[in-house]
Each structure stands twice: as C-alpha cells, then as structure tokens.
Image (tube, rainbow, N blue to C red):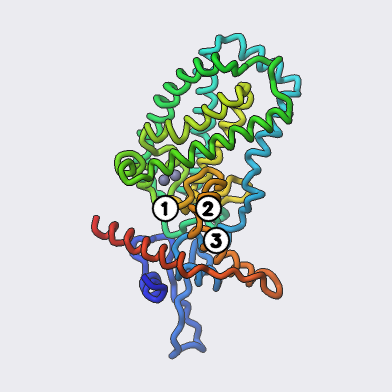
Amino acid sequence: MSVTTTTTKQLAPPTTVGILRPTIQREPEAVGQRIAPSLQYHGRTLDVVEEKMYQKRKWAYLRGAYENTKAMGIMPHVILMAMTIIFNKSPLAPMLYTWLNSYDQWTIWVVVSATIFTVTEIAVIALFTYLDLCQPQWIAKYKVQPNKHSTWKDIKKAIPTVAFNMFVVNTLSNLAFVHLARWRGNSTRFEDLPGGWKLFGQWFVCLMAEEVGFYFVHRALHHRSVYKHIHKQHHEYKAPSSISATYAHPIEYYFSNIMPIVVGLIITGGHWSLQMMFFHGLMIGTHAHHSGYNLPFLTVALPHDWHHYYTNENFGAIGLLDGIFKTDTVYKAWIASVQSEFEKTKVKGGAKHVMYHEVAAEILNRYEDEQEAEELAK
Ligand SMILES: [Zn+2]
Ligand SMILES: [Zn+2]
C-alpha cells in the first residue's frame, strides 16, 4: 500500500471507528475552494502534525501519546522500591513479619502471597477497565490506537481465561514455588530483610531474568509451528486493554509471565519482601503496557502496544534485547519520525530532523495490507 492510497482510504468517513469522526469544517470565505477535512478526536481537532501522521499510520499519532518518557516510565519501580525500603526500616516491619511468620511456609507463599497479589491485580485491572470503558476527557489524549476502543464485550470475553490463569495457574505455580523457596532459602523472617542496596541489586537481577526469560519464550511462541496453537490467543487483541495482559493460553501464561519471575527469585534467593516489590512493579507494568494508553508516570505502553499492532517486533519486557537483536527497527523508525515532526512544531528554530526510513515504511505498509486483507476475508 503506498502512502497515497492510504491517504485516500483513511479520509473516507469511518463506518466502524465510532470514536474518531472526521468532520469537514467549512469557512464562509473558503466557499468554492477545496477544503481538507479536519479530523476530530473526543471533541478536539487534531493538529497539523497529528493529522499528517494519521495519514501514514493509525497507530500513536496523538501528541499526548508521546508525553510519557522512559524516565517517567520507571516511576512505578522507583516508588515501590522507596516504599519497600522505608517500610522495612519502620516500626511496622517487625509487626508485619511477626504476624506473617506465625503461619507456616506453605501458608505464607501460597495463601498470603496469592491473596495479596490477587486483590491488588484485580484492583489494577478494574481501574484501567473503568477508565477505558468510560473514557474520561483527560485520558483520551493518551490513547495509543485512537481508532480502536475496548467494549464491554471485549472485556467479558477475556474474563474466564484471565480468572483461570489468576486462580488456577498462579496456585499451581505457588505450590511448586514453596519447595523451590525452601531449597533456595528464600526467607520470610524480619531478621533477614535486605538493606536498600541489596534490595536494589536483587531487583536488578530479577529484572534481567525477566527480560531474558520473557524475550526468548515470547520469540519462541511466535515461531510458525507454535504461534497458532498457543500465542495467537493473546494476539486476538490488536489494540490491547489492561485485562488482555493475562488473556493468554495457560502454557504461555506460566512460561512467559510466571517462570521468569520464579527464576529471578531463585537466582537471588530473595526475601519475601523482594517478591512483593518485584511482582507488584511487574504487574502494574504489564497492565499499563496493555492498557492502550501511554500515561505519564506509568510504565511506557508504546513498545508493547506496537507489538500487538505490528506483531513482528518488540518481544521483550524492557526493550534491552530487542535493541541487541534488532527486533525493534520499524518501531524505532516510526517513533523517530513522529517525534521529529512533533518537535519541529514545539521547539523554536526546529529540532534535529530524523528521517523516516522509507524501507521501514514499505515493510509496514505491506504488513498492514496483509492484515487488512485477512480481516476482510473473515
Ligand atoms: Zn506476541
Ligand atoms: Zn501482550
């Protein structure tokens, strides 16, 4: 699909979009002249650059979607780590760990941990789902794929699988983890609480284990012979929403979502406190990744939303291995292109212009054509 044909096609009045309604603004003095349609999103007219980007891609063309930076994106981890360090030094810590260790190890790792995780995860999903379905005005400008919005029907479809993974797979995993934790000596005692630097070091090891585990398992799941049997389910959502983060085949859910966390905890022999902190950081991250919104001060959603949109790139959790194995080139080219366009209109005198790689555009256009043909054939 060439850029010219895309332009013609996309400016036609949308039939299924519903949210993005192109309107033709007619000014009296312009009567008789050809007037370009002006696109509106949630009552706001797209600016010139947004509209220019919309002609190329329907993915992340709103200026607001670029307001969350990588520096802001690590905030959930920074906040959780600060909270853990402060809590562990507070008078509340001995009280919590005395109460916790009144139970046996099985109850702590299987019942107490699971209850806390389940309650907080449901709360995070519920909050994102509420925002996605109600779409308050303030959140609309951060939408990554403004042409696609989740409906209650989409959410309902995900619930049985998400609940199965949350209650059954998590429990089976925790039952296995009790034995691993006993063998490795992962402590739950107040006396063994890690200091700030140790906690940071162990968190970093867990993050690396997560990146390596998730990247390679995820790439394997994209292998032609495996994809249609397991991972295709997770990719049913081309524009993901928070709940779709754990909408996955149970085998995928265990090996790509749970196992890398377990590996990190076993390598480090981390304390219960590390498990709580790392899991919650990751859980908030994965639901923010899939939320459909790139919100400031939350984990950056653009890379994984792109993975759901384009499928063939951004396999990792933090982008480190995608950079090393060059599985993010089309994504980076698009981001560079949009940001350079936005900055030209924002920075006085014009920012350094980054050329959009035509080769990358060609690849993506061909891919989008195939996807479109596939959807029409359904
Ligand atoms: Zn995938
Ligand atoms: Zn996903």
The residue wearing badge 1 is 312
Under circle 1, the secondary element is: loop
Query: Furthest-left residue in view?
Result: 377
Tell me whether the residue at label 1 lies in contact with that at label 3, contact meaning CB atoms closer than 8 angstroms: no
Residue type beneath disc 2: Leu
Q: Residues within 10 Å of mark 3 (few under 14, many from 20)?
A: some
Q: Is residue 192 visible?
A: yes
CA gap between label 2 and label 3 equals 9 Å
Ligand 2 under 8 Å from disc 2 Cβ: no
Residue type beneath disc 1: Asn
Q: Position of residue 118 (x, y in %)?
A: 49, 28
CA gap between label 1 and label 2 equals 14 Å
Q: Nearer the viewer, mark 1 or mark 2?
A: 1
Left or right of residue 102, residue 263 in this image: left
Ligand 2 under 8 Å from disc 3 Cβ: no
The disc, 1 or 3, on the residue closer to the chain's N-terminal end is 1
Residue at position x 45%, y 76% in the image: 37
Q: Position of residue 105 (x, y in %)?
A: 55, 12
The residue wearing badge 2 is 302
The residue wearing badge 3 is 335
Q: Nearer the viewer, mark 1 or mark 3?
A: 1
Q: Is residue 293 visible?
A: no
The disc, 1 or 2, on the residue closer to the chain's N-terminal end is 2
Q: Residues within 10 Å of mark 1 (few under 14, many from 20)?
A: some
